[in-house]
Amino acid sequence: MKTRWHLVGVSGLIACIAILLYFLLFGIPFRDEESRRQVISLYDHLAVGMTAADVETNFTHVDFFSLKLRKVSETNWVIQSPMEIGARNWDLWLQFESNKLIAVKVRLADSKERRPSAAPIDKFLSH
């Protein structure tokens, strides 16, 4: 009888570890999709030519609960979505010149240059 319960306990532990590993490797699909929807929604709210203050107001006044704003420098900001294993999460890179937004780009977290295939096209201020 003790061996049977031991086997049930070990099986349960293995199942829990398998489920945990699945979510660590593949992420939580619903959270990832919601984060990407938020990135795209913010992308849609932003227009090149906006001031930095307008951009910050758009970010703080709309409910982008899973996104974080990081000011890398005075001219480069990144809106980060929650981390996904494999750096599949989307970040929104913002570039400013003379306090005006001149570029909006969706990129993968591990590369400021790699645009996800399903991401919207870059927005640039034409000179």
Image: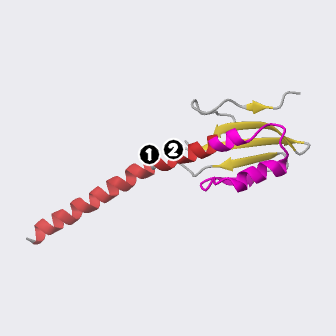
List the residue tagged with mark 2.
33
| Circle on res. 12 | none
| Residue name at image x 68 percent, y 40 percent | 43
As drawn, 9 above or below 121: below
Quadrant of the rendered image containing residue 8 = bottom left
x and y, in percent, of residue 110 in the image: 62, 42
The quarter in which the C terminus is drawn is top right
In this picture, residue 122 sits left or right of residue 26: right
Mark earlier in primary sequence (1, 2): 1
Q: Label 1 sits on what residue type?
A: Phe
Q: Is 120 in the magenta?
A: no
| Residue name at image x 83 percent, y 31 percent | 125
Q: Residue furthest left?
A: 1
List the residue tagged with mark 1.
26
Q: Is 60 in the magenta?
A: yes
| Residue name at image x 74 percent, y 50 percent | 58
Q: CA distance from mark 1 to mark 2?
A: 12 Å
Q: Label 2 sits on what residue type?
A: Glu
> Residue 112: in sight, yes or no?
no
> Residue 59: in sight, yes or no?
yes
Q: Residue furthest right?
A: 98
x and y, in percent, of residue 114 in the image: 64, 34
Crowdedness near tag 1: few (<14), some (14–19) or many (≥20) residues, C-alpha within 10 Å? few
x and y, in percent, of residue 10 in the image: 23, 63
Magenta residues span 41-70
Looking at the image, is mark 1 or mark 2 nearer the viewer?
Answer: 2
